[in-house]
Structure formats: structure tokens, C-alpha cells
Amino acid sequence: SQQGEEDPQALSIQEGENATMNCSYKTSINNLQWYRQNSGRGLVHLILIRSNEREKHSGRLRVTLDTSKKSSSLLITASRAADTASYFCATDLYNMNSGYSTLTFGKGTMLLVSP
Amino acid sequence: KAGVTQTPRYLIKTRGQQVTLSCSPISGHRSVSWYQQTPGQGLQFLFEYFSETQRNKGNFPGRFSGRQFSNSRSEMNVSTLELGDSALYLCASSLAASPGGYSYNEQFFGPGTRLTVL
């Protein structure tokens, strides 16, 4: 099963509203990253939050991380039609077998922002 | 800096054939990862290369293989194609956090190669 699970699977809002997406994971992580993907294209990195951080901001984006609940949330404030995309969380896990990290993606939240 | 480039962008093959996909990372990036994206399974990690060495491998059959060259360019190969291999194959490069590979930095993705197997 996926390490990171986003919720909701789909979200439809009006321009100007805020959008909140959540991500839950199962095991301890090094960091958690959020990415955006427009319509079958490559992913674009939005923000990285390390396991010892609780909140980060970048422009209209706010990410929180609660390691005790193994969850993260991405808030997009004052949404625009151009924010329409799929949003993925990715968890950085240390692989004891290989000795290296693996980045594991959830299945994403599809956000539709209507004008 | 030029972004991550992938070639070809689209590919149509038939079952049983093999295919090679290419990825050129951002200049200076030595870590290259490959992912398969399908509607049903989402984004799944295939493998990661750093300095011509495969450091990590996902849970895919041996038909999926890859390599990295001394200039950090990477190729992945899928042999004996199956219908289920139809997917968007994404390559991502990054500055590895440390030679030991502890912790991933920001990944820069290419536009992907859309593979259709008929």
C-alpha cells in the first residue's frame, strides 16, 4: 500500500476560497514534500518540510507537519483557476536494506478551482 | 539552467517489444530517479542512480532495468513489453543531500515519456 495517502481524492472550490489537502503516512520519515502536477505533465516541487519542523510557508502555500499523528496538510490560500492541478505528498523514508532513502508518493488530490 | 529533458515524449509499441527511454538531468545533478505513473497505481518508484550506481530499486520485475552514464544521463529499458506497462514514465534529478544518500532534496521532474503498449 502507499506510504502517503492524500485526502480528499478530489476537491472542487471557487476562486478566492482556500483549499486544504491532507496527507497521512505510516512510518517515520526524514522529510515530507509536496508536488503539483498539471494534466499529465511532470511534477513541480512546491515545498519540503523536515521531520523536525512543524510549519512552513511559501507564498500562498502553508504546510504543517504533525509527526505524532503522522500527518501533513497543505493549505492554498486565495485559490486561483491556475491552481487547478493534482497535488501529491511524498515521504522520504530511510531504507535500512539499501542504506539509502526512497521518496514515496501518494495517489494525489485533484483540485479544481472554478472562476 | 536547462531543465530535465526526456526523450522520446511519446512512444507506441506492441506487446513483446522492448523500449529504451532517455533522461538528461539538470547540469550538476548526480542523482536520477525513475517513476512509473498510471491511473490505478499512481506514482511508483522504479530505481535511483547516483554516480553510475543503482542505489535503490522499487518493486518491479527484472524486465525493467536502467543505467547511468558518466555525464549523469540515464536510460531505462523495458523488455518484453506487456499491456500493463502503458504509463507515463517520469525521470527526476536532484542534488543528493550527501554521498550516502541520506534524505532526498527537491526533485526536478522532466515532462515524462508517454508509453502506449498495444
Image (cartoon, coloured by chain):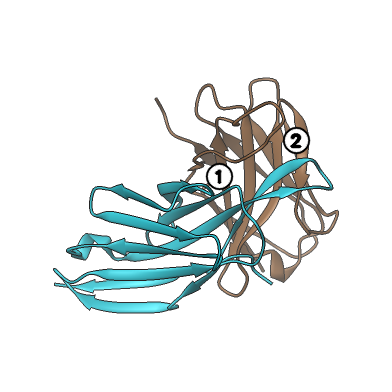
Query: Chain B's shade in the image?
Result: brown
Dot 2: chain letter: B
Q: Residue A18 versus residue B20: which sits nearer the camera?
A: A18
The mark that comes first in sequence, 1 or 2, is: 1
Q: Is residue A70 left or right of residue A37?
A: right
Residue in view at x 71 percent, y 63 percent: B14
- The local crowd at label 2, few if under 14, some if 14 to 19, many if 20 or more residues have their Cα within 10 Å, is some
Give the image location of residue B97, x and y in percent.
59, 31
Q: Is residue A108 visible?
A: no
- The local crowd at label 1, few if under 14, some if 14 to 19, many if 20 or more residues have their Cα within 10 Å, is some
Task: Give the residue number, with chain letter if any, for mark 1.
Answer: B8
Up/down of A60 relative to A106, above or below: above
Give the image location of residue B53, x and y in percent.
78, 31
Q: Is residue A115 left or right of residue B64?
A: left
Residue in view at x 20 percent, y 65 percent: A81
Numbered disc 1: secondary structure:
loop
Q: Residue B39 versus residue A67: which sits nearer the camera?
A: A67
Query: What amino acid is labelled 2 in the image?
Result: Arg
Q: Is residue A62 left or right of residue B117?
A: left
Query: What amino acid is labelled 1 in the image?
Result: Pro
Give the image location of residue A64, x and y in percent.
40, 58
Task: Give the residue number, with chain letter if any, for mark 2.
Answer: B67
Query: Chain A's shade in the image?
Result: cyan
Dot 1: chain letter: B
Disc 1/disc 2 C-alpha distance (Å): 17 Å
Numbered disc 2: secondary structure:
strand
Q: Which mark is residue B18?
A: none
Labels 1 and 2 positioned on one and the same chain: yes
Q: Quadrant of residue A80?
A: bottom left
Q: Residue B106 versus residue A81: which sits nearer the camera?
A: B106
Give the image location of residue A59, x and y in percent.
24, 48
